[in-house]
Amino acid sequence: MEPLSADTPLEVERVWIALQRERGPLWRLRRAVEMTSFCWRAAQDAVRRAHPDASPQERDRLLLRERYGDEIAEGVVRARQEKGFYD
């Protein structure tokens, strides 16, 4: 069996995986949600840096388009506009 990471010895990886399993499913779910939130915020920050003059709607459109495609991005931004999200 090969380690998942080239710079981590297999035995260290086995111990780490065993510790993750001991924490239980609720901890793992929370961790997954935290990591997803972190990634989403990082993507938002990247769009903000790449397009500093874009409006909030345009930044949302760019980010959502990259993740979900044009149709969904347009629909979400339109729905947010109708609900006053950007006011």
Image (spheres, rainbow, N blue to C red):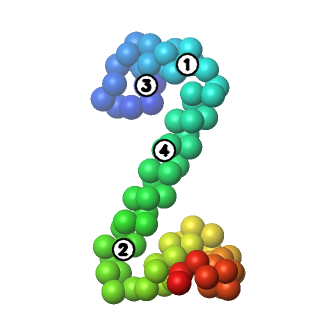
Q: Which mark is residue 3?
A: 3
Residue 85: image x %, image y %? 58, 78
Whole-angstrom CA distance, mark 1 to mark 2, is 36 Å
What amino acid does circle 2 point to?
Arg
Q: Secondary structure at mark 3?
A: loop
Which callout, 1 or 2, points at the residue further toward the start of the chain? 1
Q: Do the CB atoms of the residues marked 4 and 2 lie less than 8 Å apart? A: no
Question: Which image quadrant for residue 41?
Answer: bottom left
Which callout, 3 or 4, points at the residue further toward the start of the chain? 3
Disc 2 vs disc 3: which is toward the camera?
2
> How many other residues sit within 10 Å of disc 1, few (<14), some (14-19) or many (≥20)?
few
- 37 vs 6: above or below: below
Q: Secondary structure at mark 4?
A: helix
Mark 2 = which residue?
A: 48
Q: Secondary structure at mark 1?
A: loop
Q: Residue at x 63, y 70 (%)?
A: 68
Whole-angstrom CA distance, mark 1 to mark 4, is 16 Å
Residue 59 in sight: yes
Which callout, 1 or 4, points at the residue further toward the start of the chain? 1
Which callout, 2 or 3, points at the residue further toward the start of the chain? 3
Mark 1 = which residue?
A: 23
Q: Which mark is residue 87?
A: none
Q: Is residue 71 left or right of residue 4?
A: right
